[in-house]
């Protein structure tokens, strides 16, 4: 939110163009055409943690991941959302706070779905079906691109 405020003197058209370009670059990265070194904390949570008492491990995993102590971001969609929010935030303080809060809640819910399902099933499947993860990444990136393009067309 602070970064978007610092960038607010730039015309909305320039910020929206930057958002479209950045999200397009992240889509090219996701397709494997270009390899970007995106910043992240590459500390994985050991699989041994899930073998003893899977339900407790799922909640511990959620706490560690949610606080950012250890995280490995496997999708560029998080970066796309950050770029869109920084460059093309909703106008007005209330709309901005609401938009950023909803993005944070949505991100948290999205990351907790897998852990919640595993806790409900009393299992800890560490290896997930790759097709679902790839589909979620493409849906997220497409949504961010659509938001950025819509903002760009509205700014013109």
Image (spheres, grey):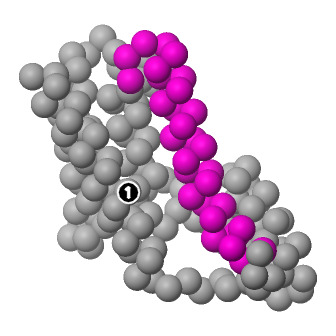
Q: Give the percent coordinates (x, y) of residue 3.
A: 45, 25
Q: Which residue is mark 1?
A: 140
- Single out the residue that lies furthest toward the front: 120
Occupied quadrant, residue 34: bottom left
Nearest the viewer among 38 and 98 is 98
Nearest the viewer among 18 and 101 is 101
Within the magenta stretch, is there residue 120?
A: no
Q: At 82% from the left edge and 66% from the top edge, which residue is drawn?
A: 59
Q: At 47% from the left edge and 22% from the top edge, which residue is drawn?
A: 96
Q: At 60% from the left edge and 43% from the top edge, which residue is drawn?
A: 105
Is residue 146 something that shows in the picture? yes
Give left or right: position of 98 versus 153: right
Nearest the viewer among 71 and 39 is 71
Q: Which residues are magenta?
A: 90-119
Q: How many marks?
A: 1
Occupied quadrant, residue 42: bottom right
Occupied quadrant, residue 146: top left
**Please, what is the dominant secondary structure of the magenta stretch?**
helix
Q: At 39% from the left edge and 65% from the top edge, which residue is drawn?
A: 137
Give left or right: position of 52 versus 5: right
* SS category of the residue bearing label 1: helix
Image quadrant containing the C terminus: top left
Q: Give the percent coordinates (x, y) of residue 12.
A: 23, 20
**Callout 1: few (<14), some (14-19), or many (20+) C-alpha neighbours within 10 Å?**
some
Q: Give the percent coordinates (x, y) of residue 35.
A: 30, 66
Is residue 46 something that shows in the picture? no
Within the magenta stretch, is there residue 117?
A: yes
């Amino acid at each position: 939110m602070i970064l978007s405020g610092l960038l607010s003197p730039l015309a909305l058209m320039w910020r929206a163009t930057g958002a479209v370009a950045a999200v397009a670059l992240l889509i090219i990265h996701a397709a494997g055409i270009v390899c970007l070194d995106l910043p992240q904390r590459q500390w994985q949570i050991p699989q041994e943690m899930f073998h003893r008492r899977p339900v407790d491990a799922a909640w511990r995993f959620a706490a560690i991941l949610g606080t950012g102590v250890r995280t490995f971001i496997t999708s560029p969609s998080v970066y796309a959302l950050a770029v869109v929010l920084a460059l093309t935030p909703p106008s007005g303080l209330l709309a901005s706070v609401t938009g950023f809060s909803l993005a944070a809640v949505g991100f948290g819910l999205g990351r907790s779905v897998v852990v919640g399902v595993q806790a409900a099933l009393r299992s800890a499947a560490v290896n997930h079906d790759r097709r679902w993860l790839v589909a979620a990444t493409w849906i997220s990136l497409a949504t961010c691109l659509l938001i950025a393009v819509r903002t760009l067309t509205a700014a013109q």
